Amino acid sequence: MKTYDNEWIFQAFENDPSFFTKRMFGGLAVYLFGRMMMVLVEPTRTGRWKWHGVLICTELAQQPAIIEEFSELAPHDILKKWLYIDSRHEDFEPTMQGVAKAMARDDQRFGIRPHPTKRKVASRGRRRKP
């Protein structure tokens, strides 16, 4: 199983019973308190993207308050609904330590609730008359 360079970020909340991870979009999504909090991203082998950092999942309305506290975060160039910090940023580690501590305190500015999956309804198709 692939490991990610920045899994050390989980230390702030890895013992919480609600914590789990899930592979998503070639990255590793982090869930806590029933919300998707972040996605660790690294360059893909296929070259689909070259990002190496962390996407912070949040609602657009929460971004200004988060950026005010963590000015190193910025809307992602492509996924503007989420914030991003590149792992090469000079303040990457202290920023992510602070973000992880806020998430561990269940700071409501962070995270998005996953949409419930819709059940697929079996096709009823047209029946032939005998």
Image (spheres, rainbow, N blue to C red):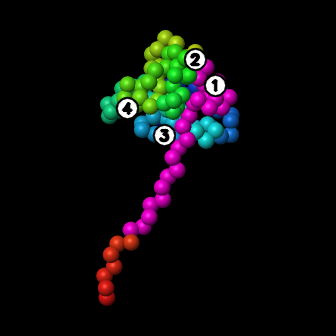
Where's residue 29, x and y in %?
51, 36
* Residue drawn at (40%, 31%) of the image: 79
Helix, strand or loop at disc 3? strand
Which one is earlier in the sequence, the residue at label 3 or at label 4?
Answer: 3
Please name the amino acid that badge 3 sits on: Arg
Image quadrant occupied by the C terminus: bottom left
Helix, strand or loop at disc 1? helix
Where's residue 7, x and y in %?
55, 28
Locate residue 97: give its quadrant.
Answer: top right
Q: Nearer the viewer, mark 2 or mark 1?
A: 2
Q: Residue furthest front?
A: 61
Q: Nearer the viewer, mark 4 or mark 1?
A: 1
- Towards the viewer: 102 or 46: 102
Which one is earlier in the sequence, the residue at label 4 or at label 2?
Answer: 4
Please name the amino acid that badge 1 sits on: Ala
Please name the amino acid that badge 2 sits on: Glu
Mark 2, residue position: 69
3D distance between C-alphas at marks 2 and 1: 11 Å
Position of residue 58 relative to residue 88, above or below, is below
3D distance between C-alphas at marks 3 and 2: 29 Å
Mark 3, residue position: 23
* Residue drawn at (59%, 23%) of the image: 99
Which one is earlier in the sequence, the residue at label 2 or at label 1?
Answer: 2
Q: Is residue 98 visible?
A: yes
Mark 4, residue position: 44
Residues tagged 2 and 1 counted as in contact (Cβ below 8 A): yes
Residues tagged 4 and 1 counted as in contact (Cβ below 8 A): no
